[in-house]
Image: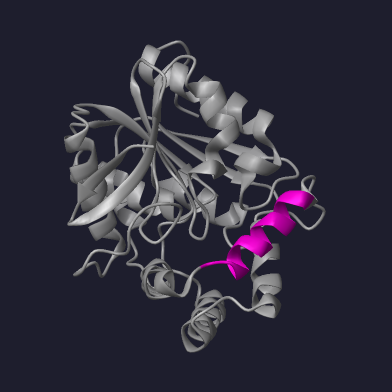
């Protein structure tokens, strides 16, 4: 699997298919495989590139001096440069959407369309921030995700009656198995994510076609947040995925694939109107 040196760290990524480049950003505490169903679908028509976040999957640890989500966007822009991607689409879920929005603002001449999936670029609500920071503190103190904490965290990523309980169990186990050397990176990223800046108003500057997609039962990023972003974006399409939680790509892959293929056909190839 390919790797690139970005910010003096090894960045692992998947690169499959041919055609217009589509960059996929995965969720916090997940990895490139979160996009498996979409990769299988989209690589038939596009070049699909999936970088793995620092401290996640097979990528290296968080680069020194990384203190905010905007820094992640800078890393991903350097990554696009290294792959000679002049223009591309970015589809990001959760923190992937957060850095994707920052990237769209930093490189408006290169990001031709933006997908914000199960994410929110406004400020973290105070109660949620306190809960997430408390969980991160426990991870830092124990230098691990002990099983009781992993069992608290996992349900946040899935619908209450998830159609893929086996994925929930596998995710819980992966949390427990995270190595001690990765904990500092994961803790720092968590504090960046849940302490992120409020860039909601800045979405008004993003004129390219945007897809805002959220699982109907997303717990950390509810539909109400998605609608706040749609209200600000000049050229947004909103899709709600019935029966899906935070990782909608895995829980309802066919519905997500349908929404993404329609969006990309319109944004890249002009097959359908994008406003609405």
Image spot of residue 130 (x, y percent)? 52, 82
* 12 lies left or right of 78: right
Q: How is the image coloured?
A: one colour
Which of the pair 220/139 is nearer the observer?
139
Residue 247 visible in this rendered orientation of the protein: yes
* In the image, residue 246 above or below residue 3: below
Residue lying at the far bottom in this picture: please name it: 141
The image quarter in which residue 238 lies: top right
What is the span of residues highlighted in magenta in the rendered image?
A: 166-178
The image quarter in which residue 64 lies: bottom left
- Count of numbered circles on the image: 0
Is residue 168 on the magenta stretch? yes
Q: Quadrant of the N terminus?
A: top left
Is residue 163 on the magenta stretch? no
The image quarter in which residue 184 lies: bottom left
Residue lying at 63% horizontally and 79% vertically, measured from the top left: 146
Residue lying at the far right in this picture: please name it: 161
Residue lying at 50% horizontally and 76% vertically, measured from the top left: 129
* In the image, residue 6 above or below residue 190: above
Residue lying at 56% horizontally and 25% vertically, measured from the top left: 40
Image spot of residue 29 (x, y percent)? 51, 60
* 12 lies left or right of 146: left
Image spot of residue 145 (x, y percent)? 58, 75
Residue lying at 31% horizontally and 61% vertically, measured from the top left: 69
* In the image, residue 266 above or below residue 11: above
Residue 113 visible in this rendered orientation of the protein: no
Image spot of residue 248 (x, y percent)? 63, 44
Which of the pair 257/273 is nearer the observer?
257
* 18 lies left or right of 94: left
Specify the principal SS of the magenta part: helix
């Amino acid at each position: 699997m390919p790797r690139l040196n970005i910010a003096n760290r090894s960045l692992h990524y998947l690169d499959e298919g041919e055609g217009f480049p589509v960059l996929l950003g995965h969720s916090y505490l997940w990895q490139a495989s979160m996009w498996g169903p979409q990769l299988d679908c989209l690589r038939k028509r596009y070049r699909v590139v999936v970088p793995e976040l620092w401290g996640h999957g097979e990528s290296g640890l968080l680069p020194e001096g990384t203190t905010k989500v905007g820094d992640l966007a800078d890393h991903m822009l350097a990554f696009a440069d290294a792959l000679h991607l002049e223009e591309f689409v970015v589809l990001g879920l959760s923190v992937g959407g957060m850095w994707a929005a920052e990237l769209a603002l930093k490189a408006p001449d290169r990001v031709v369309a933006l997908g914000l999936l199960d994410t929110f670029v406004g400020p973290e609500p105070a109660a949620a921030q306190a809960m997430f920071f408390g969980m991160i503190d426990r991870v830092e103190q124990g230098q691990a995700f002990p099983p009781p904490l992993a069992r608290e965290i996992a349900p946040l990523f899935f619908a209450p009656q998830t159609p893929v309980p086996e994925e929930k169990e596998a995710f819980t186990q992966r949390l427990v198995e995270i190595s001690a050397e990765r904990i500092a990176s994961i803790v720092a990223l968590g504090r960046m994510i849940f302490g992120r800046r409020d860039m909601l108003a800045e979405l008004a500057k993003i004129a390219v076609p945007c897809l805002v997609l959220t699982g109907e039962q997303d717990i950390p990023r509810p539909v109400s947040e998605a609608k706040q972003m749609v209200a600000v974006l000049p050229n947004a399409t909103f899709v709600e995925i019935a029966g899906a939680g935070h990782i909608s790509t895995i829980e309802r892959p066919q519905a997500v694939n349908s929404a993404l293929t329609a969006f990309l056909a319109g944004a890249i190839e002009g097959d359908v109107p994008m406003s609405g």
